[in-house]
Amino acid sequence: METRLADKVVLITGASGGIGRAMARAFAAEGARLALHAHKGGRELERWVARQPWRERALAVRADVAAAEEVDAAFAEVRERWGRIDVCIANAGVWPPEEKPLVELSEARVREVLEVNLLGAFWTARAFLRVLAEVGPREDGDGAALVFTGSTAGAFGERGHSDYAASKAALGGLVRSLKNEIVALDPYARVNLVQPGWTLTDMTRERIEEPGALERVVRTMPLRQLGRAEDVARAAVFLASPAAARHVSGQEITVAGGMEGRVQWEAEGVDAGLVRERLRPDEP
């Protein structure tokens, strides 16, 4: 499928994580120029980019997405390098692995999760829209694209992670609002959200590898398998494409094996070994 992403400038926040790196590889395969963001993992991301065959069309930038001025500075650096930004993937986020009911949650943890996952998405989107306002739409008519990474926790909730679920649920309202605002800057620009379910990444690996965790997780999925980072990345490429998704805006694509809020399988009917086998990525 033609995506028309070749030579487009794509900025991905949270590119040092598993889903972010998969997104970088997926957009690189489409021939895009990449601005890859990280915060604490910035040095590691730079080393990773330096080993890639597409490193000459990639730029690594650093910023704390919870700090609006740092986000603005990172976007300014990308604009200085390539003159514009065509696609923004607001992917950066945190997920504290320890389960804590709200009555036990500390103010510090709640503030960190909301400041990174929600306010970080706000500042990222604002910086992108400001650049778009300054440079204007593309002359070829290919609209800009803003894609957020949400979570099924925002749709179904997640016991012990109400802070995370709330931060992701709020993205739906942001998407539905910005889809109406972005067209004032670019008449063909679009805003969408990709919503992963349980996906094997460094952030979730420890939790998934707990005894019995796989069996519990896939009980609500008709497809008895976990998501891979590549699955989410391909959905993001689709939503970002001015060709494949030219008439798609304000939508949420859930990449979660058909997950519902009810049990589909009894635990004894789940083959954890098979689920693990299907977690192997398409590429190293």
Image (cartoon, helix red, strand yellow):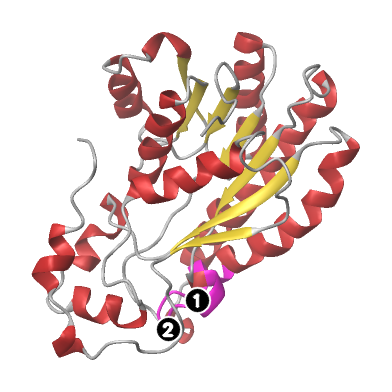
Q: Measured along the vertical axis of the image, is residue 22 above or below residue 260?
A: above
Horizontal side of 154 relative to 85 (left or right) equals left
Quadrant location of the C terminus in the rendered image: top left
Question: Are discs 1 and 2 less than 8 Å apart at CB?
Answer: yes
Tag 1 secondary structure? helix
Q: Which of 265 and 161 is in front in this view?
A: 265
Q: Measured along the vertical axis of the image, is residue 19 above or below residue 252?
A: above
Q: Where is residue 205 in the image (x, y as percent from the top left)?
A: 23, 58
- Earlier in the chain: of badge 1 and badge 2, it is 2
What is the three-letter code of the residue carrying label 2?
Pro
Is residue 14 found inside the magenta-colored segment of the image?
no
Q: Residue furthest right?
A: 184
Is residue 165 found inside the magenta-colored segment of the image?
yes
The image quarter containing residue 73 is: top right
Magenta segment, principal secondary structure? Answer: helix
Q: Residue furthest front?
A: 1
Q: Name the residue under label 1.
A: 162
Q: Where is residue 185 in the image (x, y as percent from the top left)?
A: 86, 33
- Which portion, as a residue range, is magenta? 154-166
Q: Where is residue 63 in the image (x, y as percent from the top left)?
A: 52, 32
Q: Name the residue under label 2.
A: 101
The residues tagged by marks 1 and 2 sit, at their Cα atoms, a distance apart of 7 Å
> Mark 1 against mark 2, which lies toward the viewer?
1
Give me the residue at 54% from left, 58% from top.
150
Horizontal side of 113 relative to 269 (left or right) equals right
